[in-house]
Image: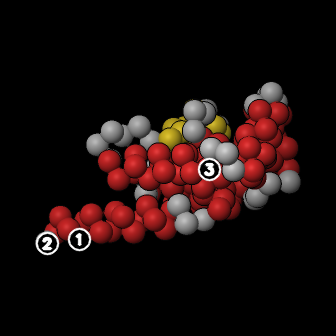
Amino acid sequence: MAKYKNNMNKFIEIAKAIADESRVRILSMLNGHELCVCQIVEVLGLAPSTVSKHLSILRHAGLVEGRKEGRWIYYRISNRSSDIEAQKALAWVHESLARDGQTQEDLRRLKAVLKIGKEMLCAQVVQE
């Protein structure tokens, strides 16, 4: 019974994490990229605290991983192969949104953001 409950809880946690447009947009941006919070903030146009909350939910669900380097925190898609449920959910998100208009616009904006130095970009984000 405990294993069933853990599977059910994991499923619900992942479902809740991907049931938000901003979080799904973040997952789409992170597909193939490792990004700092400032870069994600710039693409989404949301407050840093809001993006951090979304990333915390995604991390808790096992969908993304973060690492700190200097004053930046970088996020990427989780590569924990043991978390089959998370990997399946990520595959579903990426396959479903590969041709989505918002996803394509975010990736276009991300390409421009990646050309901006992190020092300058993060300084802009902090000032806003």
Q: State which tag comes first along the sequence, 3 or 2.
A: 2
* Horizontal and vertical percent position of residue 115: 80, 27
Distance between mark 3 and mark 2 Cα atoms: 35 Å
The one nearer the camera, 3 or 48, is 3
The residue under the point 82% across, 33% down is 112
The answer to which of marks 3 and 1 sits earlier in the sequence is 1
Task: Answer left or right for 28 relative to 7.
Answer: right
Mark number, residue 50: none
User: Label 1's element?
Assistant: helix
Amino acid identity at mark 3 = Leu
3 vs 1, front mark: 3
Instruction: Residue 84: tell me if it is visible.
Output: yes
Q: Amino acid at mark 1?
A: Lys
The quadrant in which the N terminus is found is: bottom left
Report the residue at 57% width, 39% height from top: 31
Question: What amino acid is found at the position of numbered circle 2 in the picture?
Answer: Met
Q: Which mark is residue 1?
A: 2
Q: Is residue 69 above or below residue 23?
A: above
For the residues marked 2 and 1, what is the alpha-carbon distance in whole angstroms? 6 Å
Mark 3 or 2, closer to the camera: 3
Q: Residue at x 29, y 43 (%)?
A: 82
Label 3 element class: helix
User: Which residue position is annotated with label 3?
Assistant: 97
Query: Circle 1 is placed at which residue position?
Result: 5
Say which quarter of the image contains residue 11.
bottom left
- The Cα atoms of the two marked residues, 3 and 1, are separated by 30 Å
Label pair 2/1, CB-CB below 8 angstroms: yes
**84 relative position to 104: left or right:** left
Residue 18 x/y as whole percent: 53, 61
Q: Residue at x 74, y 52 (%)?
A: 102
Question: Picture coordinates of residue 128 (x, y %)?
Answer: 86, 54
